Amino acid sequence: MDPLRTTPSGMPESEAAAEARRLLEDWAARPVRQHPTSYRDDTAPPAFGTTPPVPQPDQRIVPAWAAGIAVASIGVGAGITGIGCGAWLVLQGLSSVTLTGVLMATLPFAAVAMVATAIGGAISKARAAVTKNVYQGPVTHHTEIHNNSTTRGAFFARTRNEIH
């Protein structure tokens, strides 16, 4: 037996080729099986029947807290929309107002601000007039400095100087 003319299984190449051809022809002769991918029942359903209705329990996909947040966000969105519409209406009205109309509209605010400033000034003056500091007794003035300083810390250092 020639080792160059044999297959790894020890079969001569001519026999291996004949066996391969036989296996391929056997495989090609088999019918191809078709697998159905869908099924449609074309029979008409009955208009009524004797089968009782089947209970379908309520199984929510969304948890209750998530539904609550969704409802709250819809409410907030509707509220913000209302505020935005109100602001738009106010700004539309202000855009068509003349300078005289704007000045007349702001006049009460300016008057309130002026009265508040006057009251604040009067209170400030009244407090300053009453406060008088009267000191009685001997006064001593220490000017001696002793070099007893201590420093602590690396990045946030604190120095203490003792003055006597």
Image (spheres, helix red, strand yellow):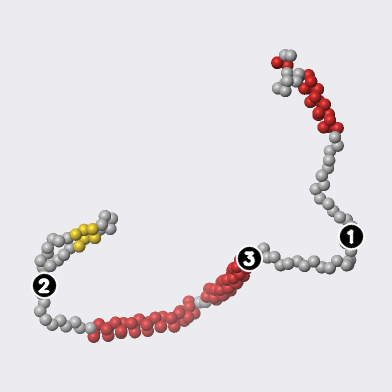
Taking the spot 28% from the left edge, 58% from the top edge, the residue there is: 156
Between the C-alphas of marks 1 and 3, the distance is 39 Å
**Few, some or many C-alpha atoms within 10 Å of disc 1 (few <14, some 14-19, many ≥20)?**
few
- Is 61 situated above or below 121? above
Q: Nearer the viewer, mark 3 or mark 2?
A: 3
Are dots 1 and 2 in contact, CB under 8 Å?
no
Mark positioned earlier in the residue sequence (1 or 3):
1
State the SS at label 1: loop
Q: What mark, if any, has residue 63 been given in the picture?
A: 3
Query: At which x and y percent is residue 80?
Result: 56, 71
| Residue type marked 2 | His
State the SS at label 3: loop
Taking the spot 23% from the left edge, 83% from the top edge, the residue there is: 131
State the SS at label 2: loop
What residue is pinned by disc 2? 141
What residue is pinned by disc 1? 44
Q: Nearer the viewer, mark 1 or mark 3?
A: 3
Mark positioned earlier in the residue sequence (3 or 2):
3
Between the C-alphas of marks 1 and 2, the distance is 115 Å
Q: Quadrant of residue 112?
A: bottom left
